[in-house]
């Protein structure tokens, strides 16, 4: 299970403007200037040059790094472990350290394919630990040691299917890397994420998912 919510795509026009700096060819720009929301329509000449540079490799398609994207992404911990191999992305996540014990956990907090008796027992066990943690709210050394031990057990027993929400800021160049490396991945979450990139982001098919024609 994975959920994405796009907040915005920024700087497409100015990335194209900078793309033309090496040849001083700004006079050939035929894209519309951005509106108040930052949206613009790429002209035929600009898109043609952008695609040629993109296919020429990272050093030529570096303008893609200027196109930034911000979105919320909710995914299981086992998926985030793989996403974290991409060090480019700035991520700000919900906190297990501060909020894991704030409420009882429910099936919708996890990316379980099926809710079996075993899974229900797991959730009940975690909620028992949360109750035990909350039962000792004093400030004594003994209370603090008890809560620390319970919290450690809670984190150790938390399934990797636990869903975590993060706000991510990245760019088109890195999303292009992800798309071609992960679009046929064995995890369904990667396939869903790559499909979201292609179907949601402006000019994704023309720039992020662009492939050389045989």
Image: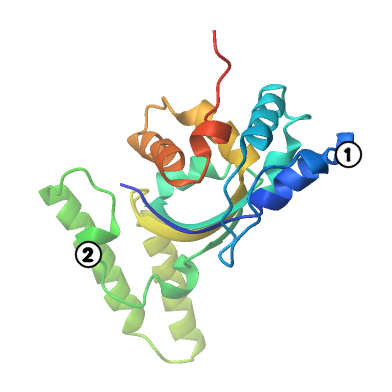
Q: Nearer the viewer, mark 1 or mark 2?
A: 1
Q: Which residue is mark 1?
A: 24
The residue that appears at 48% across and 69% down in the rendered structure is 97
Extreme left residue here? 117
The residue that appears at 51% across and 38% down in the rendered structure is 204
The residue that appears at 17% across and 56% down in the rendered structure is 121
How far is the residue under mark 1 from the one under mark 2?
58 Å
Per the image, label 2 sits on a secondary structure element best described as: loop
* Residue 157, x across and y down, in percent: 35, 55
Q: Nearer the viewer, residue 156 or 162?
A: 162
* Residue 128, x across and y down, in percent: 24, 70
Picture layout, residue 30 above or below residue 184: below
Q: Nearer the viewer, residue 183 or 42?
A: 42
Q: Nearer the viewer, residue 196 or 125?
A: 196
The residue that appears at 78% across and 30% down in the rendered structure is 59
Q: Nearer the viewer, residue 213 or 146?
A: 213
Q: Where is residue 44, by image quadrant?
A: top right
Position of 57 compared to 206: left or right?
A: right
Label 1: how many Cα within 10 Å (few below 14, some 14–19, many 20+): few
Picture layout, residue 45 above or below residue 134: above
Q: How many marks?
A: 2
Picture layout, residue 112 above or below residue 123: above
Label 2: how many Cα within 10 Å (few below 14, some 14–19, many 20+): few
* Residue 54, x across and y down, in percent: 67, 28
* Residue 123, x across and y down, in percent: 22, 60
Question: Earlier along the polypeptide chain: callout 1 or callout 2?
Answer: 1
Position of 200 compared to 180: left or right?
A: left
Per the image, label 1 sits on a secondary structure element best described as: loop
Numbered tag placed on residue 106 in the rendering: 2
């Amino acid at each position: 299970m994975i959920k994405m919510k796009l907040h915005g795509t920024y700087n497409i026009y100015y990335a194209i403007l900078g793309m033309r700096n090496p040849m001083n060819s700004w006079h050939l720009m035929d894209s519309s200037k951005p509106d108040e929301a930052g949206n613009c329509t790429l002209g035929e000449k600009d898109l043609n040059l952008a695609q040629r540079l993109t296919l020429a490799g990272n050093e030529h398609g570096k303008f893609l790094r200027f196109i930034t994207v911000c979105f919320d992404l909710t995914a299981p911990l086992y998926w985030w472990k793989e996403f974290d191999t991409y060090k480019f992305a700035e991520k700000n996540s919900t906190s297990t350290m501060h909020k894991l014990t704030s409420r009882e956990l429910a099936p919708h907090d996890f990316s379980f394919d099926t809710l079996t008796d075993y899974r229900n027992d797991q959730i009940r066990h975690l909620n028992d630990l949360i109750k035990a943690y909350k039962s000792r709210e004093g400030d004594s050394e003994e209370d603090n040691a008890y809560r620390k031990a319970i919290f450690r057990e809670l984190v150790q027993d938390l399934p990797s299917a636990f869903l975590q929400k993060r706000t991510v800021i990245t760019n088109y160049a890195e999303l292009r890397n992800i798309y071609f490396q992960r679009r046929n991945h064995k995890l369904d979450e990667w396939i869903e994420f790559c499909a979201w990139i292609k179907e949601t982001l402006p000019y994704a098919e023309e720039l992020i998912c662009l492939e050389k024609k045989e």
